[in-house]
Image (tube, grey):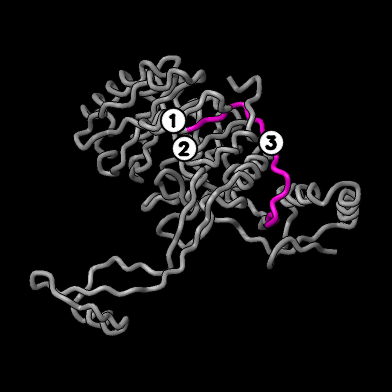
């Protein structure tokens, strides 16, 4: 017997499970039945045609398969049936977690409301400048009304600069670590969000984290890593877990600006990343990152450099009638139709993803970032009375 839950997706159910499902539908409203179908989908009925899920890319800018990063042959495969959630979203589940982290960008104080269920606020960010020094970071006094723990995020947007400042034994590294430890003095924790560590600098990065750990004393040290479904590379989950207090897995940017259109964080991929994180990081230290943002893609890109022959072809092909010269330089304008594809997050998709994580055993989640969310999502998130400590 089979039940079809979406175009091209067929789920095979044994007779006992199908009878249970039909019984539920008969006893309850059709709306609630939609939620049961969702739960069954998330519980993972195996499909004979399921294929291994690949990793995409992550984060606040880091590809999940970083260019040039060495890959390990020690892959942990997770095979799942593709999820197809109902188009007519049913009841929205409420989710409870031990810790809820959220990134907050300085200058957007209006995004920080005291009644939100957030345990850990990550202030974004103090950046390593072109000379290897730590630029002046945000002041924790601006978040004084927040009653949870505050963390200062450290970022370095250049792979070359990152290579320069994390070299073991270098004066640049010694100076940067001293500046970081001074900057984090009034915070509860330090968040390292270095997303451009070169592939051959793995040992330098781990020793950099170890040295920070020693200097922080009792403060919380966390590190951001891209979404992964297999071991290896600079951001090795197990290695990171042995060095820090929390590992923030940026399970987003599965599809990014330069990829084909697709979800920033599909349910299938997120489930696989979460399972891998649980196995390699452990439930206590794992924080599953969730995106509040979406992306759009156009089927045509018109910004480019043009040689003469190509330019004249465009002029004729699109029948540009407004040819003119500006101070002797030729110019014209033409119109093209662009088909735009958008994937984004709403309350239903966010709550459903959290519900999936909770059922997988995830205790901690985090969001990039405050100010981008549908405001009603906070109605469906609760903090456990006792977190992970």
Q: Secondary structure at mark 3?
A: loop
Query: Which residue, given by chain and number where applicable, does mark 3 sit on?
Result: 94
Q: CA distance from mark 3 to mark 1?
A: 25 Å
Q: Would you call the spot at circle 1 few (<14 residues within 10 Å), some (14-19), or many (20 or more)?
A: few
Q: Disc 3 vs disc 2: Cβ atoms closer than 8 Å?
A: no
Q: CA distance from mark 3 to mark 2?
A: 21 Å
Numbered disc in front, either 2 or 1: 1
Residue furthest left in the image: 327
Vertical placement of residue 205 versus 27, above or below: above
State the image coordinates of residue 389 (x, y, percent, origin top left). Answer: 58, 19
- Label drawn at residue 110: 1
Q: Disc 2 vs disc 1: Cβ atoms closer than 8 Å?
A: yes
Numbered disc in front, either 3 or 2: 2
Q: CA distance from mark 2 to mark 1?
A: 8 Å
Circle nearer the N terminus (2, 1): 1
Q: Residue at x 56, y 30 (%)?
A: 100
The rendered magenta stretch, by its main secondary structure, is classed as: loop
Numbered disc in front, either 3 or 1: 1
Query: Which residue, given by chain and number where applicable, does mark 2 sit on?
Result: 371
Circle nearer the N terminus (3, 2): 3
Q: Can residue 243 be seen from the camera position used here?
A: no
Query: In this view of the protein, which residue sits in the foreground, 50 or 268?
Result: 268
Range of the magenta residues?
Answer: 85-102
């Amino acid at each position: 017997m089979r039940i079809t839950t979406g175009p091209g997706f067929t789920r095979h159910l044994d007779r006992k499970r199908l009878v249970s499902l039909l019984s539920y539908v008969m006893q309850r409203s059709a709306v609630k039945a939609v939620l049961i179908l969702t739960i069954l989908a998330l519980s993972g009925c195996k499909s004979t045609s399921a294929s291994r899920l690949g990793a995409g890319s992550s984060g606040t800018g880091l590809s999940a398969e970083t260019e040039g990063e060495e890959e390990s042959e020690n892959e942990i495969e997770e095979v799942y049936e593709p999820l197809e959630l109902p188009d007519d979203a049913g009841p929205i589940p409420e989710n409870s977690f031990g810790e809820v982290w959220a990134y907050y960008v300085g200058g957007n104080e209006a995004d920080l409301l005291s009644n939100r269920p957030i345990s850990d606020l990550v202030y974004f960010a103090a950046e390593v400048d072109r000379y290897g020094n730590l630029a002046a970071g945000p002041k924790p006094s601006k978040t004084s009304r927040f009653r949870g723990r505050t963390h200062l995020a450290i970022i370095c947007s250049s792979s070359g600069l990152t290579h320069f400042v994390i070299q073991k034994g270098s004066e640049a590294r010694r100076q940067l670590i001293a500046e970081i430890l001074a900057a984090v003095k009034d915070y509860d924790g330090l968040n390292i969000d270095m997303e451009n560590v070169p592939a051959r600098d793995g040992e330098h990065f781990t020793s950099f984290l170890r040295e920070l750990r020693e200097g922080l004393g009792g403060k919380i040290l966390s590190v951001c890593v891209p979404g992964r479904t297999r071991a290896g590379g600079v951001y090795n989950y197990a290695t990171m877990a042995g060095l820090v207090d929390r590992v923030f897995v940026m399970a987003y940017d599965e599809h990014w600006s330069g990829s084909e259109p697709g979800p920033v964080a599909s349910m299938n991929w997120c489930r696989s990343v979460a399972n891998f994180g649980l196995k390699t990081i452990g439930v206590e230290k794992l924080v599953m990152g969730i995106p509040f943002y979406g992306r759009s893609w156009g089927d045509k890109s018109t910004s480019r450099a043009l040689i003469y022959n190509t330019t004249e072809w465009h002029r004729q092909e699109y029948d540009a009638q407004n040819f003119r010269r500006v101070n002797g330089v030729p110019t014209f304008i033409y119109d093209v139709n662009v088909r735009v594809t958008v994937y984004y997050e709403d309350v239903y998709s966010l709550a459903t993803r959290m519900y999936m994580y909770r059922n997988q055993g995830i205790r901690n989640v985090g969001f990039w970032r405050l100010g981008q969310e549908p405001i009603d999502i906070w109605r469906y998130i609760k903090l456990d009375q006792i977190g992970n400590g």
